[in-house]
Amino acid sequence: MNDQQRQAIKKTAQRCFGSDAQVSLFGSRTDDRKRGGDIDLLIRTSLAEPDAIARAEIAFQVEVQQALGEQRIDVLVDSPHRRVHPPIFSIAKQTSIPL
């Protein structure tokens, strides 16, 4: 992933989830020596309402696809009010790289 792609993702996340949104990359794309694979993102937001989070995630997916082109992008959204954190959240938090 290049700097232009990182900036596009970060700016889009802040536009969709709020200016305080933080984005981290995890999974295979954290290693530049590995090729391919989907883009795995962990987005931390202060949005509290599930409907607002769902709308933000849809808008984010659409805008990122437009900016980066057709790519598989997996998004985990973490918020202060999230009650359940599947195991993938722990993996993402431990291995992610902030954008």
Image (tube, rainbow, N blue to C red):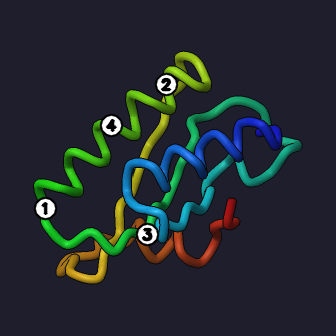
Residue placed furthest toward the top:
70
Q: Earlier in the sequence, mark 3 or mark 4?
A: 3
Q: Nearer the viewer, mark 3 or mark 4?
A: 4
The residue labelled by disc 3 is 44
* Three-letter code for the amino acid on which mark 2 is drawn: Gln
Say whether marks 4 and 1 touch (CB < 8 Å). Answer: no
The residue labelled by disc 1 is 50
Local crowd at mark 1 within 10 Å, few (<14), some, or many (≥20)? Answer: few
Picture quarter with the C terminus: bottom right
**Considering depth in this image, is 3 or 36 the residue closer to the camera?**
3
Distance (Cα) linking label 1 and label 3? 14 Å
Which element carries disc 4, helix, strand or loop? helix
Distance (Cα) linking label 2 and label 3? 20 Å
The residue labelled by disc 4 is 59
Q: Earlier in the sequence, mark 1 or mark 3?
A: 3
Q: Nearer the viewer, mark 2 or mark 4?
A: 4
Residue 33's x, y, as percent? 88, 43
* Three-letter code for the amino acid on which mark 4 is drawn: Ala
Residue 47's x, y, as percent? 27, 69
Q: Earlier in the sequence, mark 2 or mark 3?
A: 3
